[in-house]
Amino acid sequence: MTFKNLYIEHERSAEAEEWVKGEVTEQEARFAKIEASMEALAPTREKWYQEFFDRICTNGFNVDGDDKMRIPESDLPSKPQNRRDQVVWKYGVDSDDTPRNGQGD
């Protein structure tokens, strides 16, 4: 078993298998809803990107303390062709100190 292969062979009862199928169906429905709302945000997100680029070109960003550096428009990234933003669904957390469900300590 490699470090990233965390699968452990096991058998599930029919009841547990049915529960898992129900959970998967519910999660896929929730994810489809999240994905649809993220797609609906696409035009607004484009506006946010442009506002950010305008802000760092005019006001700059903090380099150290109160020191700001303006970014020339020639240094701004260009949008990749034929690529859209996508919802990234990540399972689990990276460490035990990561807040879960938006709940901080």
Image (tube, rainbow, N blue to C red):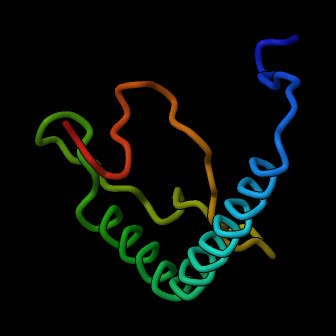
Relative to the observer, which residue lies in front, 88 or 20?
20
> In the picture, which quadrant includes the N terminus?
top right
The residue shown at (37%, 33%) is 98
> In the picture, which quadrant includes the C terminus?
top left
Q: Is 49 placed left or right of 91 in the picture?
A: left
Relative to the observer, which residue lies in front, 22 or 51?
22
Q: Residue 7 occupies which quadrant of the picture?
A: top right
Residue 77 locus on image (x, y percent) = 59, 60
Residue 8 locus on image (x, y percent) = 82, 22
Question: Looking at the picture, does residue 23 appear above or below residue 46?
Answer: above
Residue 49 locus on image (x, y percent) = 46, 72
Q: Residue 70 occupies which quadrant of the picture?
A: bottom left
Residue 76 locus on image (x, y percent) = 52, 61
Q: Is 22 placed left or right of 49 in the picture?
A: right
The residue shown at (85%, 27%) is 10
The residue shown at (28%, 68%) is 58
Q: Residue 96 occupies which quadrant of the picture?
A: top left
The residue shown at (78%, 60%) is 21
